[in-house]
Amino acid sequence: MLVPDVPAARAALRIVAHLAHHSDPVAASTLARDLQLPRSSVYQLLRVLQEEGFVVHYPEARAYGLGALVAEIGGSVLRASRLARLGTPLLERLVRGAPVPVVAQLAVLAGSDVSYVGQVAAPRAPTTVVRVGVRLPAHLTATGRAMLAVLPAGQVRALFPHRESLITRRGVGPRTLPELDAILARARAEGLSSEDGEITAGYASVAATGIDRTGYPAAALGVTYRAAAVSPADVDALAAAAREAAAALSARLQGRA
C-alpha cells in the first residue's frame, strides 16, 4: 500500500529531530537554512509545535528548543521498556505454570486507562483484544482495578470526575464511582482484582500489582482465560500465581532480593 506523503508533517518531524540534536536553542532562520525549508513555513510549523507542547520559544534568544512534552514522551517510553524488561520473565513464568491456557499481560496506568506494555500467550490461549500498546478503561480491567485499588481514594476520584456515568463495554461493569469503590475495596482486601466478561464475553481475568519504592502501583500483572474452561481450583491457582508474580515484580522495583 502506497503511503501518501504529507510534507508539513514530515517537515515538523524534521524540526523536532533537529532541535533534539542541539543542546542550545536554535533560531528559526537557522532551522530554515539547515533543513532547507521556507522560512515562512518554519515559523508556521514552530507555532503549531509550540501550541502543542513539543517546542518552547525563548524570546530573549529569539530561538526555539524542545518542550517538556517531548521529555515526558521519552520518559514514558523508557519506563515502559524498563517495566517490560523486568516483567516479561514473570509473565512467562505465569504462562508456564498455569493449569489452563492463558494470556499473561503487563499493564501500566495511563490516566483513567491502562496501557499494555507486555504480553505472553500460551499455545491454544484465548485470543484477546489486548496487544502491546492497546489502551482500555482501567475500571473495567483486572489489571486496572489492581492498580486503582492501591491509589488513594482522592486520586481515584480525580481520574473519574463524572462519578455517576462511568463508561461500560456492552453495558457490563460498574456504572458509578460508588460501584467502582466497592470493587476496589474488595480488591484491596484480597490483594487481587478480577473481571468476568467486562472486556470480552466469555473471558475472565485476575491480576495483582507491583509496587515501587514510593508505594505507587507501577504495573500490574494479569492472566486472561476462558471462563468456561476453568474450575474453582484453577482460578485459585491463577490468583495465587498472580499475587506471587506481583510480589516478585515489587521486589525487583524496590531493589529487594
Image (cartoon, rainbow, N blue to C red):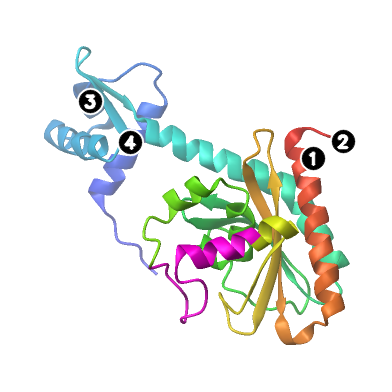
Mark 4 vs mark 1: give the one in front. Answer: 1
User: Of the residues shown, which amino acid type is indicated by label 4?
Assistant: Phe
Judging depth in this view, the residue of 200 and 58 nearest the camera is 200
Per the image, the residue denoted by label 1 is 251
The amino acid type found where label 1 is placed reads: Ala
Alpha carbons under labels 4 and 1: distance apart: 36 Å
Q: Label 1, label 3: how many angstroms apart (C-alpha)?
A: 52 Å
How far from the left and from the top, in percent, is residue 9?
Answer: 28, 48
Q: Which residue is mark 4?
A: 54
Taking 130 as reference, is 69 above or below it? above
Res 182 visible: yes
Q: Amino acid at mark 2?
A: Ala
Percent coordinates x, y for residue 100 in the rendering: 82, 77
Image point 28% across, 27% down: which residue?
56
Toward the viewer: 235 or 129?
Answer: 235
Residue at image point 57% right, 79% down: 200
Residues in magenta, as a range: 165-185
Q: Secondary structure at mark 2?
A: loop
Q: Residue at x 65, y 79 (%)?
A: 203
Other residues around mark 2 within 10 Å, as few (<14) / some (14–19) / many (≥20): few
Q: Mark 3 = which residue?
A: 33
Vertical placement of 248 versus 69: above or below? below
Horizontal side of residue 128 vs 98, given as left or right:
left
Q: Name the image quarter holding residue 83.
A: top right
- Check contact, mark 1 vs mark 2: CB within 8 A: yes
Nearest-to-viewer mark from 4 and 2:
2
In the picture of the structure, the residue carrying the numbered disc 2 is 257
- Residue furthest to the bottom: 228
Would residue 191 appear left or right of 181 to someone viewing this image? right
Identify the element where label 1 is drawn.
Answer: helix
Looking at the image, is mark 1 or mark 3 earlier in the sequence? 3
